[in-house]
Each structure stands twice: as C-alpha cells, then as structure tokens.
Image (cartoon, grey):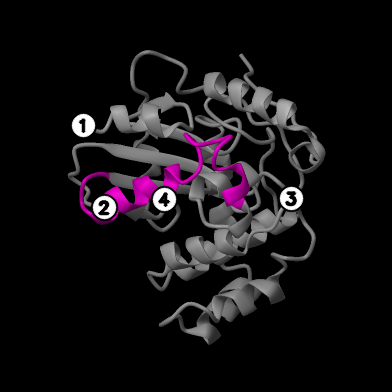
Amino acid sequence: MSDKIEIKKDTFYKGSIVVLAVLLIISIFTGGFGIGAGSSSSGGNANVANTGGNTQQPVNMNVLQDTNLYPALGPKDAKHTVIEFSDFQCPYCAMASGLPSWVSQYASQYSDLVGVSQKIEQMATNGQVRMIYVPMGFLGQESVYAAQAALCANKQDKFWEMHNTLFTAQTQGENTGKFNKDKLEILAQKISGLDQAKFKSCLENDDTLADVQKAASTAKQFASGTPTFYVDGKKVSASWSQISSLLN
C-alpha cells in the first residue's frame, strides 16, 4: 500500500501561506514532508513506498544500527531512540533543524516543527536519548552530494558538525549549485579539526556514494518523505509536542 506525497518543487517557494498550512496538516498524518523519491548516483527519482511505521506496534529498526551509514548521537543504552530520515536540501528538514537564517520567518507558522531536530540533538548530547540520522538523497544530485559529504565527515567523527554546517548554509532552492562538490569542500573548511585533504579525496572519489545509496534503499521500508521521525520504532509526526510527549 503506497502512502506517497507528491509536492512540486516550487510549492515551498511560490505557494501561499494557505497552501503551506495544508501541507503541514497533511504531514501530521503522514509523518513526513517531501517528495517520494530515492537517490541514485545521478540523483534520479524513484518512488519510495511507506511499508513500515503506520502500525500500532513498533517496527524492528535494528537495520539502522550501523553508525558508518547512519550516524548516531547519545548513549546506546538510552531509554529512548529517535530516528530521523532527512535530506539536506529539504526545506522542511531545514526548518526542523532550526539552523538556516530564513527559518525564523516561519517560526510562528510552524512553531511545532521549527527546531525539533535541534531539540532532539541536544537531548542526545545530554545523554537523555539516542538519536540516529538517516541521510537521504530525495531531491536530486546535490542532495546525494550533500549526503556523501556528511558521511565523508563521519569518517572523521565530524558528522554532526557537517550536518549543522550544511543546514546552516541551506538556501530556499534545490540543485542550484550550492551543494556541488566544490562548494561542499569550501563549506567543509569551516569545520575545525577536519582533515581537508582526506575529506576532499573521500568526496571527489565517491567513497561514500555506495553508503548513501544503501541508506536510501533501506529507508524504503520506513519513510516516504522527509523529515520522517520514529520514536522507539513508532512513526510519529514531525511535531515537537508529539515527540517530546514520548520521551518521558
């Protein structure tokens, strides 16, 4: 059974406030925003079916335990585990991160979405939860490049620094050149302690491309859009009020 959301690329940028509000309402019931598409080496689109998570019982998500593919923050024995499926070009994922400067203009409209990932990340840093991030490439070639860059940084234990750098740099547009490899190498220079030569080699040689593709393939079991959240194996809306209520 398919639970796919189709959203035109220019909806976020040219849609009215009313349209955006409708999309948010839809997302509450589907658990994610975004375009039902997977990644490939060419950034091509492929439909992703949502075959997990819309059940009352938790689904088994142990397949996401490999921290080389799915970076994690927080103790392994934490009481709760939060998993986020996210695309670095996704505007709603950017709102969830709370990091780009333009997000502030949507803070009142999307008060329950803006900063939700940031809050979970802080809880994980404090040892209160385990947070697992699944890097996606839904929105084309630059999404794939950004996910590759994040996993290249992960090889040096700098994933979360790259995660924050990418979302901070995100602009309201897709595949505009912002996340081409040369631009990603420039962004990486902002990360203290990152070996730039190793990072550049990893990115230019596509060392993590297979990992990004594997992550996208695995995500088909659980997500049809981004951001999608699970708490302890149960799919939830991208809503801080709902997520936080499950983290007691």
Report the amino acid beneath label 3.
Answer: Gly
- 133 to 238, vertically: above or below: below
Label 2 – label 1 distance at C-alpha? 16 Å
Task: Give yes or no for contact between labels 2 and 3 (Cβ–Cβ under 8 Å).
Answer: no
Residue 51: horizontal and vertical position, in percent? 53, 22
Residue type, mark 4 in image: Gln
- Real-space Cα separation, disc 2 to disc 4, in angstroms: 13 Å
Give whichever of discs 3 and 1 has the lower sequence position.
3
- Identify the residue position indicated by label 4 in the image: 118
> Can residue 87 be spotted in the picture?
no
Relative to the observer, which residue lies in front, 119 or 187? 119
Dividing the picture into quadrants, the one containing residue 236 is top left
- Per the model, the C-alpha gap separating discs 4 and 1 is 18 Å
Q: Is residue 148 left or right of residue 133?
A: right
How far is mark 3 from mark 1, CA to CA?
A: 37 Å
Residue drawn at (68%, 32%), measured in percent from left and top? Answer: 36
Span shown in magenta: 103-129
* Disc on res. 248: 1
| Between discs 4 and 1, the one toward the N terminus | 4
Amino acid type, residue under disc 1 in the picture: Asn
Q: Quadrant of residue 185?
A: bottom right
| Mark 2 vs 1: CB contact within 8 A | no
Answer whether residue 217 is visible to the viewer in this image.
yes
> Nearer the observer, disc 3 or disc 4?
4
Q: What residue is shown with label 2?
A: 74
| Residue at x 62%, y 25% (from the top left corner) | 49
* Camera-side mark, 3 or 1: 1
